[in-house]
Amino acid sequence: MTMTSKKMIPQERVSRCIRGIKPDKLPIVVINSNTFMCLYYGVSVEDYVSKPEVCADVNIKFIKEFEVDCDIVATGYILYGAGPELGVKWEFAGNNFPGFVDVPIQSEADLDKIKVPSEPSGYFKNYVEAIKIINQAVGDTYHLKASFLGPFSLVCFLRGIEETLIDMIMNPDFFKECMKLCSEISVFLGKNLLSTGLRYPILNEIFLSPGMMNPDTYHSLVAPYDLEVQRRLGPGIAPNSFAFMGIPNDQESKKADMSLFKAFFGVGESIEAIKEATRYRAAGFPFPAAISGRALNSWDTKMILSFLNDALDYLINKEGIYPSISLSSVQADTVDKASDIAGKIKAVNAFRDEYAL
Amino acid sequence: MRDILREIADKLDSCDREKIVEVLEDVREALAERFTPNQILENGLLAGLSRVGAKFKAGDVFIPEVLIVARAVHGSIDIMRPLMTQGEIRYRGRIVLGTVKGDLHDIGKNLVGIMLEGAGFEIIDMGINVPAERFVEAVKENNAEVVGLSGLLTTTMNEMKTVIDLFKSEGINTKIIVGGAPITQEFSEKIGADAYAPDAVEAVEKVADLL
């Protein structure tokens, strides 16, 4: 019996793909969303964010029911640390997940009001508790990840996205003061995620994407703070910021990272983007054959599987890569849509089981 | 002789912090030199904003640069506002913009608004989480010619169909353009939108086509 005919646990499957070694079958990586889980499992958004046991329960159910190998758990921006506990005002839009509508740093004088927490509280405390429960239940089998906010994204939550982007140019000294404070908060958030037993949290710069700002601006004004947070958490602990801004002074890498962004999130579901991105990796993840949230919502199952088949055939046969099948955003707006998407995910799972490596 | 309106446009186009800061004072000087608000707006402010829009489309500048230029333009308009008489500003059209119900994201919508203003359109910004009925009310109250619907979430994109269906059921023929991260041309056609724009710059072209 060869190594690859033995059934592997999800962690091993993911690890082998990251290292370029053939697994028993390709792993499924999911960036799950609270909207889907709340609707599919019949829990309210309020309970999801307020009751760690409820949040944990639906995440564990999802992982087991859909047999995913790697899941980014307990998703929900309100949970990530920039909540009312830091003075950010959130608004729940009906039964939808909330968005932030008012910020505590309206001027430079407000910066002193923001303190680095000494212990988790509010929604973030619920988040930490939920992750602990999930990790204890399934963390020795499944490859689990969770996000904590990076400094730039924290500044955006505390100051507002537009004001932050304007400050970068018009008031760079103030911007740097904000980033310095938020680096401390980011380290606090990351350490608390590590306290759950989760090994490799994601430093999530959720408000960054290629094309949002000049990559040179990112490298001079944002990257130093991300790197500092990563350094303080320990080498290799939180390798990602998902900025996809390439390497400083390397135009080619910036273009390639744009392609990797598209490949990672399934933007446009393009084999061309996949081809351009294959030389690069998001640290801690296998190379993705990704379906976007939009496609998962609007494509029928046949179209989804057809794209995945083409992507896998290319990556495995032409590039020699063992990718993950990535569902980069699992969202739903109604119970019926959640059921529909559940069916598609199970179809993807069945396809994955049958795909001969 | 100093061409102050051209200077205003050039300073905005530079996206340089030091020069942007000077624009407000330049606008005051232009008013003192008896330029009308409309002349300053068209030949100085919007001329500069339009050039920045072209650079944004080409990928030469990014969102922060567009925002600082827009901020300077809006600040300049605030200076001129007391001197503007009714109907002095000749707009190319009136657009109602909003993020659909259930969605609290606005940066994409705001960028579209900036670009449309730069192109000479009047914007009625409804904000975020806007129910379909409010779009209809806004169009009726303002005689708007186009409605722009924005959404970032996969879960709220179907709300755009709700808005379009409501306009149809009320017999209102206002053109509707849609956009946002999860939106595609195919989706926009499926829900009966009149146009789709993948980015803020193309939104301007599509709106102009609709009018």
Image (tube, coloured by chain):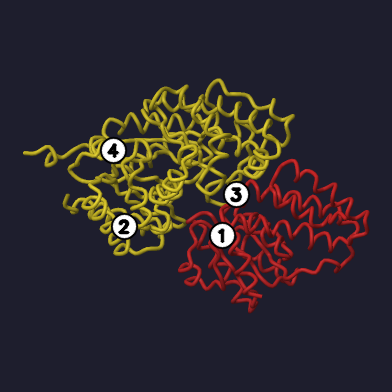
Chain colours: A yellow, B red
Q: Which residue is mark 1?
A: B199
Left or right, residue A105 beside residue A242: right
Can residue A313 be seen by looking at this rendering? yes
Can residue B141 be seen by looking at this rendering? no
> Which residue is at a point 82% across and 57% down the rendered structure image?
B5
Where in the figure is residue A203, as x and y percent of width and height? 46, 33
Q: Secondary structure at mark 4?
A: helix
Determine the CA span between mark 2 and mark 4.
Answer: 28 Å
Crowding around mark 2 (Cα neighbors within 10 Å: few <14, some 14 to 19, many 20+) is some
Residue type at the position of mark 3 = Phe
Subunit of mark 2? A
Subunit of mark 3? B
Q: Do the residues indicated by labels 2 and 4 lie within the same chain of the protein?
A: yes
Residue type at the position of mark 1 = Asp
Q: Which residue is mark 4?
A: A18
Q: Secondary structure at mark 1?
A: loop
- Residue B151 quadrant: bottom right
> Which residue is at a point 45% across and 30% down the rendered structure image?
A128
Query: Which numbered disc, 1 or 3, marks the residue that appears first in the sequence?
Result: 3
Q: Quadrant of the N terminus of chain B?
A: bottom right
Q: Which residue is mark 3?
A: B62
Determine the CA span between mark 1 and mark 3.
Answer: 12 Å
Determine the CA span between mark 3 and mark 2.
Answer: 40 Å
Crowding around mark 4 (Cα neighbors within 10 Å: few <14, some 14 to 19, many 20+) is many
Q: Of B115 and A333, which appears nearest the observer?
A: B115
Tag nearer the camera, 2 or 1 = 1
* Marks 3 and 2 in Cβ contact (< 8 Å): no
- Residue farthest to the front, as pictured: B1
Determine the CA span between mark 1 and mark 4.
Answer: 35 Å
